C-alpha cells in the first residue's frame, strides 16, 4: 500500500477504536494477563521479575477500570494447569497475593473496590489463603468495582465440580427434574457473589496468544474477544481504553438480529 494511504488507514483505525465516554463501557471485563515471562526474558531478567511487574500493573489497570465505570474486573492470575511450572516460579506466584494485598488493600479501600477470589482456594498454601481471606474480609463492604481474581482456577474443573454438586443434590432428592442454565450457573464459581458477577462482556488476552487456556468456558459464550500483542506488564491504561473502544463498536446480537448494545433491545 502507498505509504500515505497506509498512514490514513492506520489513523482511521485508531480513531474508530477510540474510547467513547458517552457510550456504555463493558460492565464486566475479564483479562487473561499473559506474557509476564516473555516481558522479563526480553529484558534478560528472570521470569519472576515479569510477575512482579505484572502485579504492579494490576494496580494501575484496576484503578483506571474503576475510574471508567467498569463494574467487575476478573483477572486470571493462576490456572489449575500452572502448577506444572518449576517449583520456584510457583512458590513466587503463591507469595505474590501476600505482597500485593499487604501493600494495596488500603488503596483498594480508598477506591471503594471490593476484592473477590475464585478458584480452588483450599489447595493454596496457608499464607496465600490467609492473604486472600483478609483482603476479601477487609473490602467486603465496598460498593465500587469488584476486583475478582481467578486463582487456582480452571474452567473444566469448575464445570465438573458443578456437575458433581448437582449429582449429589439429585441423589439426596433435593433437585428439580430438569437442570436449566440458571440452575447450572448457580453452581459455578462465578456465582460466589450472587448476581454481581454476570457473564463477562469483554474478554481481553495479552501477549499475542489467541486462545482461552481453560478460562471461563461457560461464562464467555457471548463475550466480545480482544487480543493484543502487548505483554501484560506493558498493557497500559490507553490499551484498556482501546479495548473498550473496540468493544463499543461491536454489534452484540446474541443470536438475534438486533444490536443489543444500542439500548433498544
Ligand atoms: C502470565 O504470564 C502469568 C501466569 C500464567 C501466572 P506467563 O508467566 O504465562 O508469561 P509467558 O506467557 O510465559 O510469557
Ligand atoms: C493463562 O496463561 C493463565 C494465566 C494467565 C493465569 P498461560 O501462560 O498459563 O497459558 P498457555 O499455557 O499459554 O495456554
Ligand atoms: Mg503464558
Image (cartoon, rainbow, N blue to C red):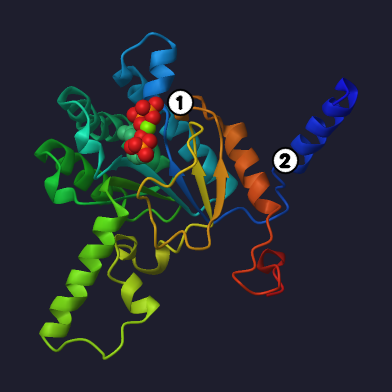
- Percent position of residue 13, x then y: 77, 38
Q: Residue furthest top?
A: 44
Quadrant where ligand 2 appears: top left
Front-most of residues 219 and 261: 219
Left or right, 171 with reference to 84: left
- Residue name at image x 18 percent, y 70 percent: 164
Taking the spot 67% from the left edge, 64% from the top edge, the residue there is 261
| Residue on which disc 1 sits | 233
Residue 259, numbered label: none
Closer to the camera in the image, 64 or 171 = 171
Disc 2 element:
loop
Q: Quadrant of residue 264?
A: bottom right
> In x, y percent, where is residue 119?
25, 51
**Is any atom of residue 254 visible in this view?**
yes
Q: Judging from the image, what secondary structure is the residue with disc 1 in?
A: helix
Q: Is residue 20 above or below residue 105?
A: below
Q: What residue is rendered at 21% in x and 86% in y?
A: 175
Q: CA distance from mark 1 to mark 2?
A: 22 Å
* Residue closer to the observer: 81 or 151: 81
Q: Quadrant of the N terminus?
A: top right
Q: Residue at x 26, y 90 (%)?
A: 176
Residue, disc 2: 18
Q: CB of mark 1 within 8 Å of CB of mark 2?
A: no
Q: Residues within 10 Å of mark 2 (few under 14, many from 20)?
A: some
Disc 1 residue: CB within 8 Å of ligand 1:
no
Question: Relative to residue 130, is residue 176 drawn left or right?
Answer: right
Residue 177, position as x, y percentages in the image: 26, 91
Place residue 124 in its image quadrant: top left
Up-down relation of residue 237 to residue 30 (above or below): above
Amino acid at each position: 500500500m502507498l505509504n500515505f494511504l497506509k498512514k490514513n488507514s492506520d489513523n482511521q483505525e485508531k480513531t474508530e477504536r477510540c474510547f467513547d465516554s458517552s457510550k456504555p463501557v463493558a460492565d464486566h471485563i475479564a483479562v487473561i494477563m499473559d506474557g509476564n515471562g516473555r516481558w522479563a526474558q526480553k529484558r534478560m531478567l528472570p521470569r519472576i521479575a515479569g510477575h512482579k511487574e505484572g502485579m504492579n500493573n494490576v494496580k494501575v489497570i484496576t484503578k483506571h477500570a474503576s475510574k471508567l465505570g467498569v463494574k467487575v474486573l476478573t483477572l486470571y492470575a493462576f490456572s489449575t494447569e500452572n502448577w506444572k511450572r518449576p517449583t520456584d516460579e510457583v512458590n513466587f506466584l503463591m507469595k505474590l497475593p501476600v505482597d500485593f494485598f499487604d501493600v494495596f488493600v488500603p488503596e483498594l479501600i480508598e477506591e471503594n473496590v471490593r476484592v473477590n477470589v475464585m478458584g480452588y482456594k483450599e489447595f493454596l498454601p496457608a499464607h496465600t489463603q490467609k492473604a486472600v481471606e483478609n483482603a476479601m474480609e477487609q473490602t467486603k463492604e465496598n460498593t465500587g468495582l469488584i476486583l475478582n481474581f481467578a486463582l487456582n482456577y480452571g474452567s473444566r474443573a469448575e464445570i465438573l465440580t458443578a456437575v458433581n454438586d448437582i449429582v449429589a443434590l439429585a441423589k439426596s432428592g433435593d433437585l428439580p427434574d430438569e437442570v436449566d442454565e440458571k440452575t447450572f450457573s448457580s453452581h459455578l464459581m462465578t456465582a460466589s457473589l450472587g448476581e454481581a458477577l454476570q457473564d463477562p462482556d469483554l474478554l481481553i488476552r495479552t501477549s499475542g496468544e489467541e486462545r482461552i487456556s481453560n478460562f471461563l468456558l461457560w461464562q464467555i459464550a457471548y463475550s466480545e474477544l480482544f487480543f493484543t500483542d502487548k505483554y501484560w506488564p506493558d498493557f497500559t491504561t490507553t490499551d484498556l481504553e482501546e479495548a473498550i473502544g473496540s468493544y463499543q463498536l461491536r454489534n452484540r446480537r446474541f443470536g438475534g438480529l438486533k444490536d443489543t448494545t444500542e439500548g433498544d433491545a
